Amino acid sequence: MRYCKDFIVVENETITSTLFILKLQYPETLPEIKAGQFVEILVEGNKDVFLRRPISIHDVDIERNQISLLVQIVGKGTDQLSNIKIGDTLNLIFPLGNGFTIVGKRVLLVGGGCGAAPLLYLARVLKQRQIKSDILIGCKDVNHLFSKKEYESLSNLHIATEDGSCGLKGLVTSHKIMEEDFDAIYCCGPTPMMKAISKHAKQKNIPCYVSLEHKMACGFGVCLCCVVETNIGNKRTCVTGPIFLSSDLKDF
Amino acid sequence: MNNIDKRLEVTIKDMVLRNPVMTASGTFGYGYDYEDFMNLESLGGIVVKATTGANREGNAYPRMAETSSGMLNAVGLQNKGVDYFCNTLYNKIKDINTNMIVNVSGSSIEEYVEVAEKINELKNIPGIELNISCPNVKQGGMAFGTDPKMAAEVVKAVRRAYNKTLIVKLSPNVTSIVEIAKAVEGEGADSLSLINTLFGMAVDAEKRQPLLSTVTGGLSGPAVKPVALRCVWQVAKQTKLPLIGIGGIMNATDAIEFILVGATAIEVGTANFINPAISQEIVYGISEYLDRHNIKNISDIRGII
């Protein structure tokens, strides 16, 4: 079941000049939300922002009926969204997409930049299911690192930064945690990074789940704009994905 | 089922619509995609995604670009073909209690006829919408809808193969839409729906490249509404067929505007992406408009402009 309902903004936390976290209160009891699912936000009052904006769910607080969204400012829609005030309402279509398939006894989560957004809630779900996880976050510098405390409370956190201001200096692929044995890898981030991690998983002969980000008009399967080429033809990122087994994707 | 407002009932050939609000092909899936958000039976009709003879993968990504007050798409008629529709999808939609209409497309007259013949056998499909106006396929589509002779030829052939309500969807990308409308009226079309998307393009100045993989696409959304209103108004004055107005309808007021210029019914398209319950809300909004203006029947204001 998907819903189209208003949420109330309870927090708008600035992380960097282009990154912010919204915490939204649902006035009713939240339905079940899977890690890796996303929402479509209505951004009103700008003729250049016509369609909703798909944003992945960063975290869910089921007791408080709150969800968090990590948003990067990439255009007019997300820029306008960054100015939203506490107490304002936002209309969301949710929860959308398939979510992560939970497998294995020990798994690795790899996130790059703001693409790491859905991994926090994934780490929370894994902990609830008593699956051991390590999480490796790659970002530009220490200032672009978000939700560090939360990650640490749920998983073993490893960090790689481009400038070495936190953790390893370099790319996630060169981090030594990559050499350890895992049952599966969950990866979200820039496409070149997901391709590199997917290649690594292939060598290790373990499944690698990636989260794709494609332009979409609706987000719930009807516009057919967000297709991705898979081994069995074009599939809609919004309903068959956004989480795909990387071995099913043509370009990976 | 919500209370039926009898003032809204309209007829298109043999189809009785409980109200003039339909949903446009390509924006409403197969109907059931919207079940979570609204009561499908509150609608006058649903036009499902275009169906072609064989499976089509559609165009490459990116297929969509947002524009001011609208969007461009270049989906390219992605669908699994008419046999899959008849054998699988039909069973999922046949019990939806509203007029379930199939949008029929093709690259040749033979393909249009093949699809129409097969859909003709489906008991619970009261009509088809012949798509001679898709701007996003290399062969066929808009080519049939921009030449009066070709438009007449395809409608003539399909008319022979199809004996239920035949709606023909017109392209605005022509010098004279009235000429095309008259050509298909002459060959036995029962109704015209207009307009399909406007042929357009969008460019990324920073990357210095087009935003769509196909370079060009079809523009929809409120940006096209003035063009659509003009087309409906012109065709209403020059033909006798019941018209279905389409183009940028976002609310009940927009729908009323189309009825005032001569539309019997309307199709809600791109707006479904933004508010998935909008079509049902438009039904209520039309009732409210009739209340507010003390109008006894929707037909009393049809074509008064």
Image (cartoon, coloured by chain):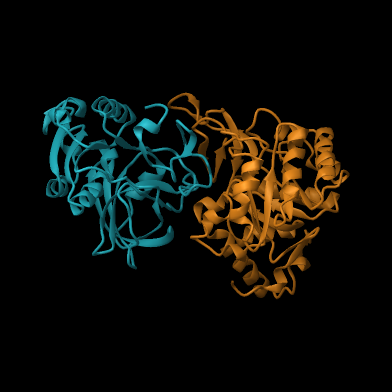
Chain colours: A cyan, B orange
Note whether B156 is above or below A249 in the view shown. below
Quadrant of the drawing holding the N terminus of chain A: bottom left
Residue A55 located left or right of residue A132: right
Residue A163 in percent (x, y) is at 15, 27
Picture residue at 73% right of the left edge, 60% below the top: B260
Name the residue nearer the viewer: B7 or B81: B81
> Quarter of the image holding residue A104?
top left
Name the residue nearer the viewer: A234 or B3: A234
Picture residue at 56% right of the left edge, 65% below the top: B39
Residue A86 located left or right of residue B266: left
Residue B169 in view of the camera: no
Q: How many marks?
A: 0
Name the residue nearer the viewer: B226 or B82: B82
Picture residue at 46% right of the left edge, 46% below the top: A49
Residue B130 in percent (x, y) is at 73, 44
Q: Specify the farthest residue to the right.
A: B186
Residue B166 in percent (x, y) is at 78, 49
Quadrant of the drawing holding the C terminus of chain A: top left
Note whether A16 is above or below B94 in the view shown. above
> Quarter of the image holding residue A108?
top left
Note whether B72 is above or below B5 in the view shown. above
Residue B1 in percent (x, y) is at 59, 71
Residue A22 located left or right of residue B271: left
Residue A151 in view of the camera: yes
